[in-house]
């Protein structure tokens, strides 16, 4: 039994990080993925926020699943998600007000991030709380991972910095386009291209 | 402090220079999945415009007449999302009654408007930027129109490139994102026309 549970745990982790990565494979939750990724610090906070709120909301919804009537489950899911996002918003504003301000409305928009709703619908509804928590957490980490990779290239090429620290020589001319919106689409598209190609190769 | 912007300027700006989709990335999920089909895109664009205009207005009233006087600012996310969910529910019933074809075309995507970040995002931006009632109405309508324009453009382009030889790994989402990026670059050309921020 314990062996079984262990393989299950790693399978969920691998699934959510690679094969079924919410951003790269399922193309969900990318609104915020694109908006915050021209800065690594903001991206990291955002990703951790999403991972934690997904984990806790999945956990809570899984605990409550026996009492939620099928018909109103959407609105209950949204309420539980909002609860955790509000907590997150208050915490961020209390401890790191600068970053909270930079992220602005995108914190509130975690509520409408399809990853949270998607995990609640697809996993938490039919699984025990512990597994739901793990599933939510790993989905969030899968999201964080893709965001960090996108943000790495955008910040490096757009500002010549990493985590705000200049790393490129002075002669480097920043690519202004990397700071602006279109580059987010291009970088993510290239990531998805590589992701899909590798997956296809593995399947053969 | 209400920003000193003429509502009509705001309308034009939110369609072209500050398009919610191309510059703020709001509403991407349904954007990518629906834009496979031009007709459904048109329907969804219409629905989003309608929902956005109504919800932005109602959320403005709720925020300024209920949340602010009672100092419930920390509850605004929940209140906004409930208002949005209720309006979408009503709209769904109305569309089902008035136009069954459109209802079938939109299928499961109409309820998904509730979790469309564009709707929630515009309400949050409206509150963050302190727009007054009229400005909010035009901001909501303009954002909806901008989203509609963007999804119809993308759906039309996707129909054309469908049969082109695209590398296997780029098929679907990859090439769609690149297309959106190029549309976004084209829209950057409007950027010099207006400044609202």
Image: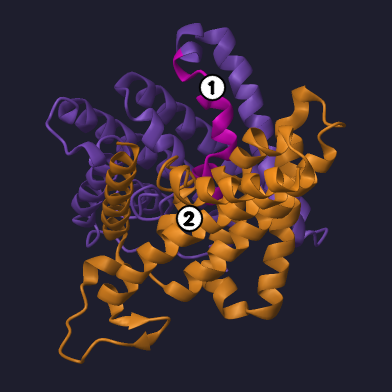
The residue closer to the viewer here, B80 or A127, is A127
Measured as percent of width and height from the top left, residue B195 is found at 32, 64
Residue underneath mark 2: A32
Inspect this view and state whether residue B147 appears: yes
Figure disc tally: 2
Q: Quadrant of residue A181?
A: bottom left
Identify the colour of chain A in the image: orange
Please tell me which residue lies in front, A138 or A160: A138
Point out the image quarter for the C terminus of chain A.
top left
Q: Which residue of the protein is positioned furthest toward the left in this rendering?
A: B165
Q: Magenta segment range?
A: B105-123
Image quadrant of residue B2?
bottom right
Classify residue B123 as left or right of residue B169: right
x then y, percent, for residue B147: 38, 40
Image quadrant where one finds the N terminus of chain A: top right
Front-most of residues A198 and B106: A198
B164 w.r.t. B92: above or below: below
The chain holding disc 1 is: B
| Mark 1 Cα-neighbour bin, 10 Å: few <14, some 14–19, many ≥20 | few
Q: Position of residue A31 (x, y in %)?
A: 45, 50
Q: Chain of mark 2?
A: A
Disc 1 element: loop
Q: Which chain is purple?
A: B
User: In this rendering, do the residues under marks 1 and 2 share a single chain?
Assistant: no
Q: Which residue is mark 1?
A: B108
Q: Residues within 10 Å of mark 2 (few under 14, many from 20)?
A: many
Would you say residue B116 sits in the magenta stretch? yes
């Amino acid at each position: 039994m314990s062996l079984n549970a262990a393989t299950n745990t790693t399978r969920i982790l691998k699934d959510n990080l690679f094969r079924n990565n919410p951003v790269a494979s399922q193309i969900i939750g990318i609104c915020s993925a694109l908006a915050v990724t021209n800065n690594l610090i903001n991206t990291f906070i955002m990703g951790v926020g999403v991972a934690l709120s997904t984990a806790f909301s999945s956990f809570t919804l899984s605990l409550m699943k026996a009492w939620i009537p099928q018909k109103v489950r959407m609105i209950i899911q949204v309420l539980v998600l909002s609860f955790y996002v509000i907590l997150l918003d208050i915490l961020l504003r209390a401890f790191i007000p600068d970053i909270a301000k930079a992220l602005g409305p995108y914190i509130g928009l975690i509520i409408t991030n399809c990853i949270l709703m998607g995990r609640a619908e697809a996993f938490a509804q039919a699984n025990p709380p512990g597994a739901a928590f793990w599933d939510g957490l790993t989905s969030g980490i899968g999201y964080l991972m893709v965001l960090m990779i996108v943000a790495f290239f955008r910040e490096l090429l757009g500002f010549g910095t990493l985590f705000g620290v200049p790393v490129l020589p002075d002669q480097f001319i920043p690519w202004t386009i990397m700071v602006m919106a279109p580059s987010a689409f291009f970088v993510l598209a290239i990531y998805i291209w590589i992701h899909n190609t590798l997956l296809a190769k593995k399947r053969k | 402090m209400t920003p000193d912007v003429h509502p009509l300027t705001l309308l034009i700006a939110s369609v072209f220079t500050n398009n919610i989709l191309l510059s703020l990335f709001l509403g991407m999920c349904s954007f990518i999945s629906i834009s496979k089909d031009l007709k459904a895109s048109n329907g969804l664009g219409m629905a989003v415009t309608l929902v956005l205009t109504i919800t932005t207005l109602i959320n403005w009233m709720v925020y300024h007449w209920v949340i602010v006087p009672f100092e419930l600012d920390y509850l605004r996310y929940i209140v906004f999302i409930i208002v949005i969910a209720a309006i979408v529910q009503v709209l769904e019933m109305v569309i089902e009654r008035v136009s069954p074809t459109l209802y079938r075309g939109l299928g499961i995507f109409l309820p998904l408007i509730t979790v469309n970040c564009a709707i929630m995002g515009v309400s949050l931006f409206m509150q963050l930027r302190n727009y007054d009632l009229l400005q909010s109405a035009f901001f909501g309508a303009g954002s909806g129109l901008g989203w509609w324009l963007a999804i119809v453009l993308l759906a039309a382009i996707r129909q054309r490139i469908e049969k082109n030889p695209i590398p296997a790994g780029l098929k679907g989402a990859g090439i769609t994102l690149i297309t959106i990026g190029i549309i976004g670059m084209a829209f950057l050309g409007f950027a010099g026309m207006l400044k609202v921020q």
